[in-house]
């Protein structure tokens, strides 16, 4: 058994070996503390890494973003959320954090995510966001 603690990650990676077939495999362990997400309509739900991952996967679909980059992004966002003083976090805070991280990773994925998160209603919303992105970049 081999234990590794990646830097800046909430994940512990362990190499293991099956005692029956002797095949080696990897497991990933994460610290779980209850984070509560406060939604737009003030309802509350338990934070779900898988739900966050699904939203980001839609944004990075067919983009040159590796699985390793995605997992680092998710680890970074989750670590940021867990390091906050409160265990209740607004969905707006999460959305803005995801957009900030995506902007530096892949600008097309950023625009895709922003279009859903900010509920773009027409092409002019896309154009305005791209203009803002072009000025800063």
Image (tube, grey):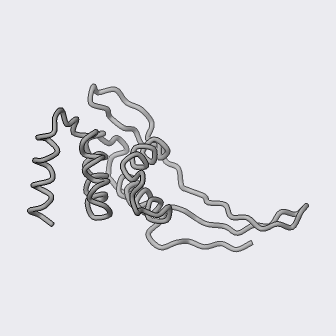
Question: Which residue sits at x=13%, y=41%?
Answer: 125
Measured along the vertical axis of the image, is residue 4 above or below residue 86? below
Residue 131: x and y, percent? 10, 54
Residue 47: x and y, percent? 43, 41
Question: Which residue sits at x=15%, y=53%?
Answer: 130
Q: Which quarter of the figure is the N terminus placed in?
A: bottom right
Measured along the vertical axis of the image, is residue 84 above or below residue 122? below
How many dots with numbers? Answer: 0
Residue 29: x and y, percent? 60, 58
Determine the image quadrant of residue 44: top left
Q: Residue furthest right?
A: 20
Residue 112 or residue 100, whichever sits in front: 112
- Judge from the rendering whether residue 41 lies leftward or rightward of residue 13; answer left or right: left
- Judge from the rendering whether residue 134 lies leftward or rightward of residue 92; answer left or right: left
Question: Which residue sits at x=42%, y=54%?
Answer: 62
Residue 82 or residue 41, whichever sits in front: 41
- Judge from the rendering whether residue 97 lies leftward or rightward of residue 32; answer left or right: left
Q: Which quarter of the figure is the C terminus placed in?
A: bottom left
Residue 38: x and y, percent? 32, 34
Question: Which residue sits at x=36%, y=52%?
Answer: 81
- Judge from the rendering whether residue 105 lies leftward or rightward of residue 23; answer left or right: left
């Amino acid at each position: 058994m081999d234990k590794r603690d990646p830097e800046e990650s909430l994940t512990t990676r362990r190499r293991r070996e099956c005692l029956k077939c002797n095949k080696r495999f990897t497991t990933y362990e994460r610290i779980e503390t209850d984070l509560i997400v406060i939604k737009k309509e003030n309802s509350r739900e338990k934070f779900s890494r898988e739900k966050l991952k699904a939203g980001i996967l839609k944004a990075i679909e067919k983009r040159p973003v590796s699985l390793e980059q995605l997992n680092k992004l998710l680890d970074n966002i989750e670590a940021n959320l867990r390091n906050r003083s409160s265990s209740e976090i607004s969905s707006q805070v999460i959305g803005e954090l995801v957009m900030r991280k995506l902007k530096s990773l892949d600008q097309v994925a950023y625009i895709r995510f922003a279009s859903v998160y900010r509920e773009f209603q027409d092409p002019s919303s896309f154009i305005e966001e791209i203009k803002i992105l072009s000025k800063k970049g």
